[in-house]
Image (cartoon, rainbow, N blue to C red):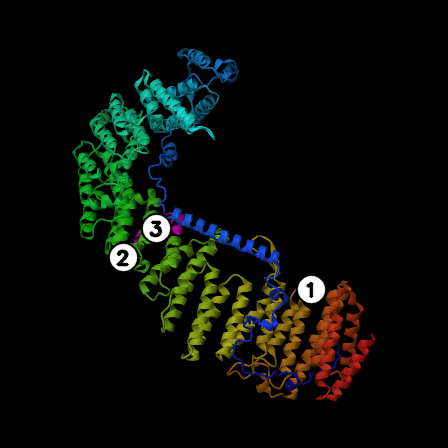
Amino acid sequence: MTSLEWVCLPRGYEVCKNQLPGFIVQEHPLKRELATPMLDSKSKPLSLALEGTDPLTQFARQQELELSDSKISNEYELKAKRRERDRIEPEDNTLQWSSRRLGILNRFNTNEKLSLSTSFLVSSSSSSEGIGENIKAQTVVADKVKYRLEQLDHFDDCSMRHMMDLTQQEYIQRFEQLKQELIQSWHSDQRVKALKIAIQCAKMLSYTTVLQFYPSQYVLITDILDAFGKLVYDRLRAKCNGGIGISAASLEREREAARDTCQNWFYKIASIRELLPRLYLEMAIFRSYEFLPIEKRNYTKLLQRLTRQLRGIADPLVSIYARCYLVRVGVPVTPDRNFIRENFADLFIIYPQIFRYVSRFNLHPEIITATSYLQLYAPAIDYMLLCLVHKSDLHAQEIVQECKKLKNNGAILMSILNSLKPEFIAANALDFIEVINNCETQGVSKSQLLRSLGSCVSSCAPLQEQRALFLKAAFETINKLTDPNEYINCVETWAVFVAQYFTIHEVNRLLGELNGRMCLGKAYEKHYAQLQIILSKIMQNYGNIELLLIQPNFLPYVDLFHNESVRVEVCKTILNYYKENSEAHSSDAVVNNALMYIGKILNDSVNALTVEDERRQISQLINVFIHKVHFGHDLEQQLSFYVEARGNFGNLDAVYVKLVHAACKLAKRSRSKSTGFVKACIAYCFITIPSISSVQQQMDLYLLCGQLALHYLCLGQADACFEAALDLVNELPAAIVDLDGKPRSLERYLVSYLCNMLATLIVVPDSPEQGVLYFLRLLLDVVGRRDFKANSTAPSIIYLNALDMLYAQSLERFPYHIDGVVSNDALYGHDPKFLNEINHLCCQVVDSILMQLKSLGLAQQQRSQSEISLDLFLRIVRYADLEKETIFQLALNLWFLANKNHTQLDVKTIPQTLLNVEYVYKLIKDSSPQRANVLAKLLLRMRNS
């Protein structure tokens, strides 16, 4: 519209200000007041005045008081009981066999085929025809005896079935079926059958055909024996307790019957011909001895008798596990540990016999190796030893002394190290290291013993004066290990001890020895996992990560990881630990160089195939390192560090963004510095920003740096940043892909960004080389060339904000300034030529908005068209001279256009707009009558429309 005559009107600030009177207050006005009404006798409410006169009310209140008192007392009792329960020492599960069961089953398994012999796992057809399934509970004692004799005949040995070639899983399933069969037989009153199942299971404990599976076989079978013993015990307990409401005489008769039944069970078991099932069955129901008279339940004598009977078992493996079962059933019933000590005395006697088997297996390693064979004994010996020394070291020293006298004492020594308390081992650390150094046992290497010892002293160290001598003696043996696998496994355990209790010099020496040993024959290639674990343990247990980073052997240790993926993981671990455990700031050049080297390894690992999440993790770790580098008042050194970091981390955009922000903060710290340093920081940012791949991030950083330069009066740098930002607008993609893979439009971001830019450009003075309002003209040109989405309102919103900016430029004094910056209000001094340029630009902007309105109308976007029409209408009312006929007519047309499509708008929009115009009229009717008359004329036309 070439005929449009836009003239910006001055604004009277004194009219717009609404000063509120202030007054002094004693408290904060937002503080809540808590009012507590005071009632006197004259102002009592009726309910209080009549209190006590109503008997029913008094009775109800009395009941409420009693209920509340009883409730309080009950709560007090509950709390007292809870406190009393909390004071009770928590249950000690150390000796619970169930906690070891799963570990044994997972550790001792086999791929060999197993066999099972039993007469109870029969097919469903034959079982349905069997006598045992058809026997019902009888009420006459003679009938019970008859049927049980029939059962014994039916389950004769001739019915034994042999299942061959079972896998381990099938073998376990068969034992689970046997257990369920035993329980079902018991509950169906077929207790002889249940006993026969238990006997057959106990016989299987003598089978050692598949040696490496024997500990798991022992666990499965003893589970069945435990279930049998529990069934017997529960039945006897139920008999002793009697029924509800039973008389004392009847209860005594029931207890007498229970004693007889209990004695009968022991007689039945004593009549079993074979030794092993007889002993196991007696041990399985050992707890039931409590139902016998006192003279017959001397647990100490009973356990000693069973211990001596176990001497009749020839196979040492079967014998030791039988003794383990005896300890399992004996520990819960008696605190006396002498029977365990006697079992260990027998164990030391049969111990040499074990090594006859070891020698045999050395000749036939295809059956089982000597190491694997000796490991079969570990669960049983460990548990027995743990029960012996639990909560008491009374027998510990004796066991250790007897162990020293044994030949080939490695297996016992290993169990001692695994079972005794770390405090005891730490107190005798020098003795243990001497025993280990002198130990020569087939199947038990020194490295295994040293690893166990290292685990103990890591949790509880020897005395301070013994540590250096102890460490020296230990590593004299460790360094003699020729096998790299044994060596690295030992050091993996001892690394915790060295890092926890020794200085950085010993830690550095350990890293140096590792570097030397692992480089021989490139042994590090086979032990990346152990090397990584050692480094993690050292960092976790040595508190000062900065001191660790500056050691001469630390970075060479990192260089041992030649595998790219492992090397990256190690570097990430180091930086992550530095992030969580370092000081808030670091100024040590050696530490910074070490971390820079580690960060560069991570940066170099990033390529086009690296996933975004990996980039993000690496960038976060490096950014934390950059954030912690702080050289105090030496700002030049800080900037030099940022320059070096820019050269090392070129593959990570997020790190470049962090460096730009850090340089901006550094410029803010230079209050006492000259503008030369600030210009250096901004120049650093200006050079760094183009290396970032994201156009959106580049635009944000250019605007930030331009605002910073403007704040420090670096006008040339500010102009360069603003111009670079505007040049990038047309390179900004229409949409980006979010983390969830969905596209996200950047149109809203662009509108917000350019509005922010316009708000900044208000105070930016014009350059004499570029002309009046150069940046605004450039912005409008960029918006005009930008390809927005069809029917988008984004250009109109930007043009409306540009109109706001132009009106601010027309004021005699801008609404805000930057200290020291001579903005256009002071630069042009409200010159008429400058105002003419502003008015001319306003006409161009309004023309652009009207073109957008026409496009929206053609696209049937009435709602958007009406909203933009009202926005432009209000700006004309506030900013433009309505005395100009073209402006007045334009305002009316915009109002009519919006009112025409008022159904598309919110119901409050049109009335609110009318109220806004009336408000402007009230403000100016006294100060500017001529303008008020024109506005009144406009209001009249608006109301009549």
Of all residues, the one furthest to the right in this rendering is: 944
Q: Is residue 483 visible?
A: no
Majority secondary structure of the magenta segment?
helix
Q: Taking 10 as reference, is 755 above or below it? A: above
Q: Which residue is mark 3?
A: 536
Q: Can you say which quadrant of the picture contains the N terminus?
A: bottom right
Point 61% across, 79% down: residue: 773
> Residue 552: which disc?
2
Question: Residue 685 at x, y = what percent?
Answer: 47, 69
- Where residue 521 appears, as percent x and y from the top left, is 28, 43
Q: Secondary structure at mark 3?
A: helix
Indicate which label's residue lies in the foreground, 2 or 3. 3
Residue 355 in percent (x, y) is at 23, 27
Q: Which quadrant holds residue 23?
A: bottom right
Q: Which residues are magenta?
A: 556-570
Mark found first going from the N terminus, 2 or 3: 3
Determine which residue is flagged by label 1.
792
Dot 1 surroundings within 10 Å: few (below 14), some, or many (20 or more)? some
- Which badge, 2 or 1, comes first in the chain's sequence? 2
For the residues labelled 2 and 3, the Cα–Cα distance comes to 18 Å
Is 786 magenta? The answer is no
Q: Nearer the viewer, residue 444 or 4?
A: 444
Amino acid under disc 1: Ser
